[in-house]
Every structure is written in C-alpha cells, then in structure tokens.
Image: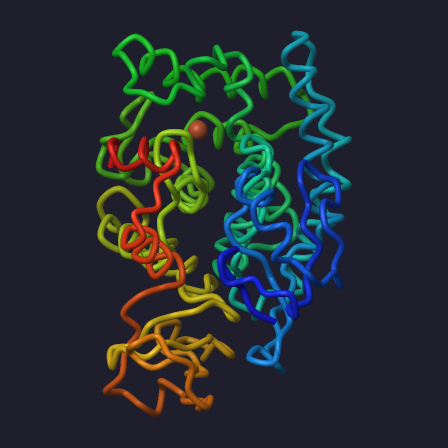
C-alpha cells in the first residue's frame, strides 16, 4: 500500500482504503479506475489516497484509529457541542464510550509510529481536530506511563479542549484574512469559555476542566489567557498544548496549508524547553512517523523512494524502496535501510515534493494563490 497524489493515479491502481467524506463512504476500498475520480477528489479537498499497486507490494500501513471509532467520537462530540449552543450542560457519559474505544485503538498500536494527517482532508475540522488532539495527547500520556484513570481524564479533557469555540462567532473562526485586534481578543476567550462550560458538568474532575483553560498557556509565559509559566501549567495542560499544535499544523486551514511532518517536528523541538515541555515533546516524537510508511520521499542523492517500514527509535532513518532516479525516471527497485546507509539522508517528504511539482507547473487554484499570498 502507498500514498499517491491525485495526479499519479492510473487505471490499474486499486483503492486500498475507503475514502470518507463527512463520515460517509465516498469511494469504497477495492475500486480501480481511480484516475476518473481525481478531479472530484481535488474539488472536495482530498490531495492523496492510499492505493495498492506493483510498486507498493508488501508495504503494510497499520490503521491506527479505525474509521468506525473516529466517526463515533465525532458524532458524540457533535451532540455534545449542540448542547452547548442550546445552553445546556454536556452529557459527558455519552462521550465516554466512544472515547474508551479510541483509547483502546491507541493502546493496541502503542508500539507503532502513528500518522493521522493523511487523507481525511475533507473532515469537518472542529470535530476531526478534537479527536486527533485526544489521540496525540494519549500517545504522550502512554509514554509518560499514565495509568487508566489518568489516561481517561487526559483524553476527555483533550477531546473537549475547544468546546468554548462553540460560543464564538463562526465568521471569526473561519475568517480567511488577517484578524483584527478585537477578533483576536474574541477568539482568545475560548479557553475560559471551555472552562466555564465544563464547570457545569459536575462529574468532571477539576484537572479535566483545567485542560480547556490552560491549553494555550506556554511555559515561557507567552501564552494566554493567564500568561502562566512553567509548572504552574498543569501536566495535562502542557500535554494538550503540544497535541493541539501538532494537529493544527498538520491540517489545512482556511488561512494556510498544512505543514509537512518534518517541519512540525522541527518546530516543536525548536520551541521545546521554551514554550513546550521538553520531556513531553520527546514523548510525542517517539510515537510519530516523521516520514509515514507508504509515503514518497527524496533522498540526498536525488533519487526517489517509498517508505517501506520504520526503524524504531530512529524516525529519520526508515527503510526505503528506491524507484526513480534523480531525473524522475523509473528504475528497477532497490531497497535500502537508512540505518545501514548513513551517508544518505531524506531531503524532502511527499508533501514537499508535491508542492515543488505544483510550483514548477505553475499550478495555482484560487485557494493556493491565496495561501501563497499569506505565506
Ligand atoms: Fe484552543
């Protein structure tokens, strides 16, 4: 199985994973002739899909979180959030079941390097982001050795961390241009609003409520709303701060395109010990695939390859199947383990290669032009 850009689709490739749009199956796994769908997929914001073909033979990509679990979590969250809009308290017990299933999925894959930011570009951002934040928070919690009770609290607070946004004007949240000072101020009310909403749920522990309040605080005091510093921010708040940023940067937003994984990890490392807790960033790094299995990369000798599998503890040095020379022509495949070939490094991820190609072709849809202008 591998991840291919729409432009690379050909009639022989078989869809390896169903494509979901807003929780419903859009194209079923097993379909061929996918090139016919490329235009439609592009229109709904899906940039790449998982396929089986000769080149990707025997490459297995573990499904980290099942689509069923993800959909159930999003549905539960949708219900909870509609209560907020109706000024009713959230029924936390309705979220607990789907959230337990999510934690089970994460725990079942705890040794696998995870990557969520792949094809569900057409996801409803609010719910998808909340679920992914809970997954990344869980990964950090597992690495820190949290037991079941603490894990449940952490995941519950993580999935509800942005609940307060339900009370902010959607026009401000979705605004594509620069925000005014007043609009910024309005958005920055959401941590306190989340805390207030969660305070009405009597069954919730104070530590869970504080995740909402503290997930935008930064250890160097540069965060909001209370400019807390260091360990004055609770451990849960420090974890969800990292999980939130990781997922936000790996998603396309109306004001910027998503960042490649390697750049997000660079960003977290650069700010760890300042904005983010050192140890917690290290925990996440251990569990995230910098170059996901099945994705394309460029190597330092200019050739192109597919990631076949990860080398544990060495996320920058996976096993690669080389299939194109530096000129981009197909060559007989050759598999190398970057742990053994230390002179070779990865110089570009699939997303970076795709963006270079688009720039070369002068490929500019309206949206991409807008992204270009805003950096
Ligand atoms: Fe937030």
Work out whether 267 lies above or below 130.
below
Is residue 248 left or right of 301 when viewed as pictured? right
The image's colour scheme reads rainbow
Q: Quadrant of the C terminus?
A: top left
Work out whether 44 lies above or below 188.
below
Q: Quadrant of ligand 1?
A: top left
Which residue is pictured at 35% across the width and 36% down the height?
Answer: 256
Q: Nearer the viewer, residue 21 or 148?
A: 21
Q: Is residue 325 visible?
A: yes
**Rendering coords of residue 330 (x, y %):** 42, 81
Count of numbered marks: 0
**Rendering coords of residue 340 (x, y %):** 35, 92
Is residue 41 left or right of 290 when viewed as pictured? right
Q: Nearer the viewer, residue 166 or 30?
A: 30
Which residue is pictured at 61% across the width and 57% down the height?
Answer: 35
**Rendering coords of residue 194 (x, y %):** 52, 20
Q: Nearer the viewer, residue 130 or 195?
A: 130
**Rendering coords of residue 18 (x, y %):** 71, 55
> In which quarter of the view is residue 283 placed?
bottom left
Q: Quadrant of the N terminus?
A: bottom right
Work out whether 243 lies above or below 2.
above
Q: Is residue 158 visible?
A: no
């Amino acid at each position: 199985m591998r991840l291919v850009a729409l432009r690379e689709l050909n009639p022989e490739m078989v869809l390896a994973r169903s494509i979901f749009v807003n929780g419903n199956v859009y194209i079923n796994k097993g379909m061929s002739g996918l090139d016919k769908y490329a235009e439609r997929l592009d229109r709904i914001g899906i940039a790449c899909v998982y396929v089986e073909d000769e080149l990707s033979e025997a490459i297995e990509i573990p499904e980290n979180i099942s689509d069923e679990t993800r959909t159930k979590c999003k549905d539960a969250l949708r219900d909870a959030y509609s209560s907020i809009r109706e000024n009713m308290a959230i029924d936390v017990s309705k979220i607990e079941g789907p959230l337990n299933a999510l934690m089970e999925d994460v725990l079942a894959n705890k040794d696998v390097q995870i990557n969520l930011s792949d094809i569900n570009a057409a996801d409803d951002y609010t719910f998808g982001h909340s679920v992914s934040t809970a997954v990344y928070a869980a990964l950090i919690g597992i690495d820190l050795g949290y037991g079941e009770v603490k894990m449940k609290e952490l995941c519950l607070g993580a999935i509800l961390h942005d609940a307060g946004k339900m009370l902010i004007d959607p026009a401000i949240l979705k605004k594509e241009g620069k925000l005014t000072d007043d609009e910024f101020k309005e958005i920055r009310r959401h941590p306190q609003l989340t805390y207030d909403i969660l305070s009405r749920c009597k069954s919730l522990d104070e530590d869970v409520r504080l995740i909402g309040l503290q997930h935008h605080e930064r250890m160097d005091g540069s965060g909001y709303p209370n400019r807390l510093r260091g360990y004055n921010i609770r451990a849960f708040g420090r974890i969800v701060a990292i999980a939130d940023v990781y997922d936000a940067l790996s998603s396309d937003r109306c004001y910027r395109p998503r960042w490649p994984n390697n750049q997000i990890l660079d960003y977290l490392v650069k700010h760890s010990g300042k904005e983010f807790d050192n140890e917690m960033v290290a925990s996440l790094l251990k569990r995230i695939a910098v170059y996901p299995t099945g994705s394309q990369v460029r190597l330092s000798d200019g050739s192109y390859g597919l990631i076949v599998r990860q080398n544990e503890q060495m996320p920058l040095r996976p096993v690669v199947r080389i299939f194109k020379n530096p000129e981009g022509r197909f060559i007989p495949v050759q598999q190398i383990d970057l742990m053994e070939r230390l002179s070779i490094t990865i110089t570009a991820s699939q997303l970076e290669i795709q963006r270079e190609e688009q720039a070369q072709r002068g490929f500019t849809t309206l949206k991409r032009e807008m992204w270009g202008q805003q950096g």
